Image: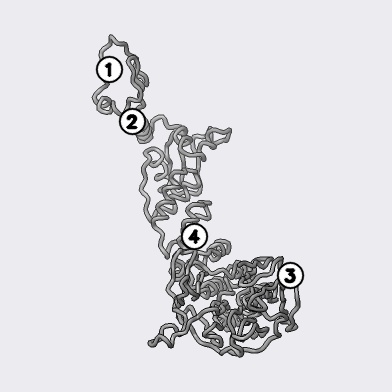
């Protein structure tokens, strides 16, 4: 019987033998009055079984594969059809094309038997005991579907104790998908994987790509630093020259300042390696400048306790109702966080509560500072996220509202504003270490409701109202190095009740 059956209208209905007729529904694809076309999907299985029987009977075999002391009789055409390695060997003008016996290296007899059983039957048994050898042999002889099967098995078998070995195996055989899956597993289970010595065997490039990830699951950056130092000390003479290369993946600016001084800078290997000093300097500048430096190493990881959030603090509603709540939004996780209400807003007696309106706020070193206000003109508080509390600090020397705050050189500045009688030119600087305010050079133009921003180690005061009715277009610039103010280019328009922010090489004014 051929692939196509011919019949006329006068011929009886076609019938196949019993085995075929039971599958006729699967075979028929297109039927008309004169022809029936069918695809015998079962034929491939018949061919496969037939070839396997021929191998077992040692019938029509034309090549012998020699592995260790064992010989395997095979058919060249079957091997070439299943493997690009054997296709290249038998279809090109190589000496193996004509040899009766071919000696194979890089595989043992037991594993070769598994490969040949798979080639002739499409079946194999993968176990924890044989998966590495089977994967290596399948990769060597280019049985690509077998490689994929082994990779899937290893992905399902990932554990903290074996993931590093699987990662190195994937890297050695250029299995990019498996490598990526294992790296993701290590990143998500980092603190557990660290408990196994095998982690210290990771090559430098794989370690760096792991530590660089924003998704690395750590609760504090100190864990990453200690991992790097343990890795270097594991083979110190060999790895010490790699210390700068690996350490640049640690986000040193995010370390606790005390830990940075007492542990990082005091470490003997760190002190002996001048090439890491720029990384240390970056961290120092980050802490001293009040987080003004922005690099890849100042960005918090997704799973650390730190997270960049938006905070909407106090204010009034449309009907002039005072708002005591602080709204905190995490844009990356798309979630809202619970934050303590503004201070002195939950007293037992209503008239003891303070209304925070027309105050100023700023952030410094992961703390939020608020100052002044119409009813709180001398008050200064800071919010500590780790304990979710507002902490009162030293009072302002001169009370004010409708003012602004800015951070420059690790200090908090309170600038200008209104004292209830007039616009003032006073500026005070707060030293967080000593918890004290000191007078700084006064503004050149007394203003309130202006915009303020720090940019390239200078402070800019833009616009504002010199009195209740007018606005100004002046831009005042403060240099902390000389403690002096100067006037810069004026704004295109006079404006007050505005805000400003510096981003990259510009200061943006809105409002």
> Residue 303's x, y, as percent?
47, 68
Find the distance from the CA under tag 1 to the CA under tag 4. Answer: 60 Å
Q: Sequence order check: which comes first, mark 4 or mark 3?
A: 4
Q: Which residue in the structure is indicated by mark 1?
A: 14
How crowded is the residue under tag 3: few (<14 C-alpha within 10 Å), some, or many (20+)?
Answer: some
Find the distance from the CA under tag 1 to the CA under tag 3. Answer: 97 Å
Callout 2–callout 1 Cβ contact below 8 Å: no
Q: Is residue 332 toward the left or the right of residue 485 in the image? A: left
- What is the number of the mark on residue 490? 3
Callout 3–callout 2 Cβ contact below 8 Å: no
Q: Which residue in the structure is indicated by mark 4?
A: 183
The nearer-to-camera label among 4 and 2 is 4
> Residue 16's x, y, as percent?
27, 21
Q: Which residue in the structure is indicated by mark 2?
A: 42
Find the distance from the CA under tag 2 to the CA under tag 1. Answer: 19 Å
Image quadrant in which you'd find residue 247: bottom right
Residue drawn at (54%, 66%), measured in percent from left and top? 211
Task: Point out the residue furthest to the front here.
Answer: 469
Image quadrant in which you'd find residue 325: bottom left
> Is 298 or 77 nearer to us in this picture?
298
The nearer-to-camera label among 4 and 3 is 3
Q: Sequence order check: which comes first, mark 4 or mark 2?
A: 2
Image quadrant in which you'd find residue 481: bottom right
Find the distance from the CA under tag 3 to the CA under tag 2. Answer: 85 Å
């Amino acid at each position: 019987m051929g692939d196509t059956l011919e019949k006329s209208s006068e011929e009886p209905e076609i019938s196949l033998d019993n085995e075929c007729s039971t599958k006729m529904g699967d075979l028929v694809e297109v039927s008309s009055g004169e022809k029936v076309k069918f695809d015998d999907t079962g034929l491939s299985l018949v061919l496969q079984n037939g070839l396997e029987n021929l191998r077992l009977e040692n019938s029509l075999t034309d090549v012998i594969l020699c592995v260790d002391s064992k010989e395997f009789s095979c058919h060249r055409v079957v091997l070439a059809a299943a493997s690009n390695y054997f296709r290249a060997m038998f279809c090109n003008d190589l000496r193996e094309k004509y040899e009766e016996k071919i000696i194979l290296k890089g595989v043992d007899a037991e594993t070769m038997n598994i490969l040949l059983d798979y080639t002739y039957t499409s079946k194999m048994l993968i176990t924890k005991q044989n998966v590495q050898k089977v994967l290596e042999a399948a990769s060597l002889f280019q049985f690509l579907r077998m490689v994929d099967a082994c990779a899937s098995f290893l992905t399902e078998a990932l554990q903290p104790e074996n993931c590093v070995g699987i990662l190195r195996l994937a890297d050695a055989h250029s299995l990019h998908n498996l490598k990526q899956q294992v790296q993701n597993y290590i990143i998500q289970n980092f603190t557990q994987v660290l408990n196994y010595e095998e982690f210290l065997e990771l090559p430098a490039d794989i370690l760096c790509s792991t530590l660089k990830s924003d998704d690395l699951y750590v609760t504090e950056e100190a864990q990453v630093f200690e991992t790097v130092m343990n890795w270097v000390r594991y083979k110190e003479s060999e790895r010490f020259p790699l210390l700068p290369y690996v350490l640049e993946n640690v986000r040193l600016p995010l370390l606790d300042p005390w830990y940075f001084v007492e542990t990082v800078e005091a470490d003997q290997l760190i002190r002996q390696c001048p090439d890491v000093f720029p990384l240390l300097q970056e961290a120092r500048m980050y802490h001293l400048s009040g987080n003004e430096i922005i690099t890849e190493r100042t960005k918090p990881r997704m799973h650390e306790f730190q997270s960049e959030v938006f905070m909407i603090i106090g204010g009034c509603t449309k009907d002039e109702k005072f708002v005591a709540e602080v709204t905190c939004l995490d844009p990356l996780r798309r979630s809202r966080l619970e934050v303590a209400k503004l201070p002195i807003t939950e007293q037992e007696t209503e008239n003891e509560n303070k209304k925070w309106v027309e105050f100023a706020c700023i952030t410094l070193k992961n703390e939020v500072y608020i100052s002044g206000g119409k009813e709180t003109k001398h008050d200064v508080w800071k919010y500590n996220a780790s304990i979710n509390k507002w902490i009162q600090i030293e009072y302002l020397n001169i009370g004010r509202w409708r003012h602004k705050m800015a951070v420059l050189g690790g200090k908090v500045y309170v600038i200008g504003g209104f004292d209830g009688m007039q616009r003032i030119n006073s500026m005070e600087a707060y030293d967080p270490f000593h918890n004290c305010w000191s007078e700084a050079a006064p503004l050149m133009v007394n203003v309130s409701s202006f915009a303020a921003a720090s940019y390239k180690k200078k402070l800019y005061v833009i616009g504002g109202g010199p009195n209740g009715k007018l606005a100004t277009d002046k831009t005042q610039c403060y240099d902390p190095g000389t403690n002096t103010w100067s006037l810069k280019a004026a704004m295109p328009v006079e404006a007050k009740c505005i805000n400003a922010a510096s981003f990259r090489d510009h200061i943006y004014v809105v409002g």
